[in-house]
Image (cartoon, grey):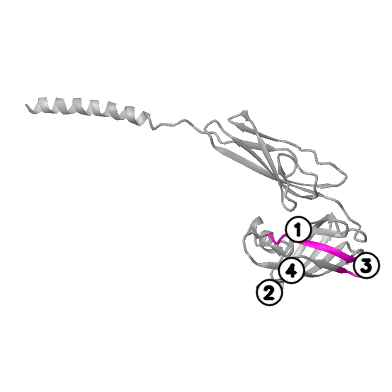
Amino acid sequence: MKILKYKLAVIFCIIFLAGCEKEYDSFITKITYYPTFEMAGSGKIVVIDPDVYTEPGVTATEDDNELEVTTSVDGLYQGHSGSAIGTDHDIYSFSYSAGNSDGYDGSVERTVIYVNTGDLVNSLEGYYKGTTTRTTGEAYSDIDVIIFKIADNKYGLSHAIGGWYSYGRVYGPDFTAKGTEITVNDMASNDFSFTSAYTDGWPNEFQVKTMTVDVGSKTISYHSEADFGGVWDIVLTQQ
């Protein structure tokens, strides 16, 4: 009787394990190859008008099989949105995305800075490298800043406080104090008027108070203040 029970137990285990094997097989998945990107050209390209931007291209593959790449382009300061660069002078964020056969997406990004270069006598336009210093002593440098023409004697400034939060402290684009418009009353005497700037992340107001243009050194210096007491001095060097 004991031998019979033992044999029945062994048979039951074999049947049970066979059933488990089938269930286990249902959990086995294939290997997923995420999209791999290869970007031609640099991750940041500066184009000076009248030069025209030419897309270097991006390819994506899944286990050596080429994938379709979708390109989306946003102008950070003048509102352009599309699949290619706009006509406005702006800093453009390019996003190249692709999805693999299992539905997993990936992307890479490129920045294209498209500007006109002014002579700082008749025009403030240009691509600048900025150094922004708060009165507390904390400073950041090598920040991309642009000034673009809106209308006669009126210009847009990309960073009212020189990108101190968004790029200096790396809080991200939502904390860029943008929206400042510069009205040139008299360039030679550094007589300018300014509108306020705001961030998407905070409700605070940032105001450029004064601006000085130095044609010889190709620099623009300006002083900005926030409604919560923050004070900054920014120096831009035209590139």
Query: What's the distance in space between the residues labelled 2 and 4, CA to CA?
Result: 18 Å
Q: Where residue 207 is drawn, which disc sits there? A: 4
Q: Which residue is mark 2?
A: 136
Which is nearer the N-term, disc 2 or disc 4? 2
User: Any magenta on residue 181?
Assistant: yes
The amino acid marked with disc number 4 is Gln
Residue 195 percent coordinates (x, y): 77, 65
Viewer-side label of 1, 4:
4
Q: Pick whichever, 15 or 126, lies toward us.
A: 126
Kind of element beneath mark 3: loop
The residue located at (54%, 37%) in the rendering is 104
Q: Is 153 left or right of 159, judged from the image as shown? A: right
Which is nearer the N-term, disc 2 or disc 3? 2
The amino acid marked with disc number 3 is Ala
Q: Which residues are magenta?
A: 176-191
Query: What's the distance in space between the residues labelled 2 and 3, CA to CA?
Result: 32 Å
Query: What's the distance in space between the residues labelled 4 and 3, CA to CA?
Result: 22 Å
**Is residue 239 something one can see in this rendering?**
no
The residue located at (10%, 25%) in the rendering is 4
The amino acid marked with disc number 2 is Thr
Q: Which residue is mark 1?
A: 158
